[in-house]
Image: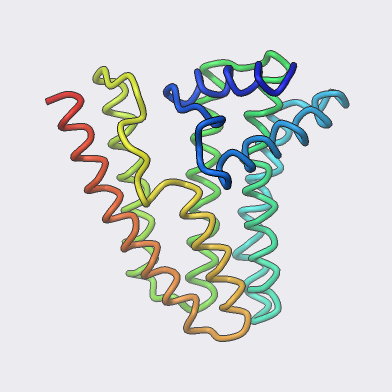
Amino acid sequence: MTWEEYATAWSRLHGGFDPRQASPVVRGWVRGAYRIGSFLARRRISPFAVTLAGVILCLAAPVAALAGPAGVGLAALLVLLAAMADGLDGAVAVLTGRVSRAGFVYDSVADRVGEAGWLAAFWVAGAPGWLVVAAGAASWLHEYVRARAAAAGMAEIGAVTVGERPTRVSVALCSFLFGALAAPAVVAGAAVWLLLQTIGFGQLIFAVRRALG
């Protein structure tokens, strides 16, 4: 499959959002997933295997954080690797012709379970429990509203908010990187996660109201 064919297929699966017209960062990320996914597809690695590997990496983050500052730094690496896996399972599915509605559901569930692992790592690394729970609830609500809006007939993604999954990846990664040097960075990261999810939720509600109201 060529890059052009892949980008067209990827766009259909993401509400018509064309990666070829996206920002250089997003375009580079999707193109990188295409290249690595092609490598994995040629070796007959299934999308489910990539998804499972990503979940395991996420759930390993709080275990690593138990080891103190060095473990928190390791958690940052685990977040990065899990984020790569998250982008690759869909790429492998497209490239191998294994895209399915069931796979979409499994991938979404894996994302939520993985984020729960990151949030648990925030708590293990010193963030207050109430803040971690609030941050998690805000991000889950963000995704729940989009899913319900799609079920109600919203054909597109509605809005690319400041609280999308790439934002959560970035916040978790930076929080653990800096948290390995100074513990308060983890608390600040959890607070930033909550703030961005709250703003993103507001953006999404406005978009849903405009699309379905």
Q: How is the image coloured?
A: rainbow
- Image quadrant containing the C terminus: top left
Q: Residue 92 is drawn in which quadrant?
A: top right
Residue depicted at x 53% and y 59%: 170
Q: Is residue 27 above or below residue 102?
A: below
Q: Is residue 202 above or below residue 6?
A: below
Residue depicted at x 79% and y 27%: 38
Is 200 or 130 nearer to us in this picture?
200
- Image quadrant containing the N terminus: top right
Residue 161, percent from left and from top? 35, 45
Task: State left or right for residue 135 relative to residue 11.
Answer: left
Residue sitting farthest toward the left: 213
Residue 201, percent from left and from top? 27, 47
Residue 130, percent from left and from top? 33, 69
Q: Residue 17 is drawn in which quadrant?
A: top left
Q: Is residue 146 above or below residue 76?
A: above
Residue depicted at x 65% and y 49%: 82
Q: Residue 5 is drawn in which quadrant?
A: top right
Residue 152, percent from left and from top? 24, 20
Task: State left or right for residue 199 relative to residue 84.
Answer: left
Residue depicted at x 37% and y 40%: 160
